[in-house]
Image: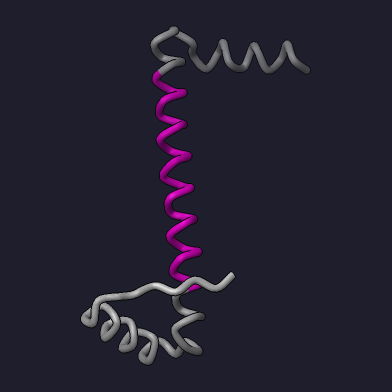
Amino acid sequence: METKIKLPDELTAELNRIISELGFNGNSEFIEEAVRDKILELKRQRFFQISDKIALGLKNNKVGSKEILDDFEKEK
């Protein structure tokens, strides 16, 4: 899939400087890696948000680690 984006001139200049300094093989390689890293960061952030909601729900329902472990043992 090919996607084109328009970047402000100052961002393009910074992008070109970084690409040159870090030895990337062009804009596409750098941008692909940057987008991949950003997607991973967002997935990680979403995971922790969901984990926090689950932990809060367990706490509000007074479910502790003993109850969780007991439940796992029952399922074996």
Dominant SS of magenta comes to helix
Indicate whether residue 22 is drawn in magenta: no
Q: Which residues are magenta?
A: 32-56
Of residues 33 and 61, which is closer to you in this image? 33
Q: Residue at x 47, y 56 (%)?
A: 39
Residue at point 46% right, 47% down? Answer: 44
The percent position of residue 21, horizontal first and vertical second, equals 36, 90
Q: Compared to 34, does 59 lie above or below?
A: above
Direction top: furthest residue: 62
* Image quadrant in which the N terminus is located: bottom right
User: Where residue 19 sits: x, y (%)?
Assistant: 39, 86
Q: Is residue 8 left or right of residue 45?
A: left
Q: Is residue 6 above or below residue 45?
A: below
Left or right placement of residue 17 versus residue 59 in this view: left
| Residue 16 percent coordinates (x, y) | 34, 87
Q: Tell me what residue is drawn at x 55 percent, y 73 percent.
A: 2
Looking at the picture, tell me which residue is in the foreground, 43 or 61. Answer: 43
Q: Is residue 43 above or below residue 19?
A: above
Q: Is residue 33 part of the magenta span, yes or no? A: yes
Image quarter (top left, top right, bottom left or bottom right) of the C terminus: top right
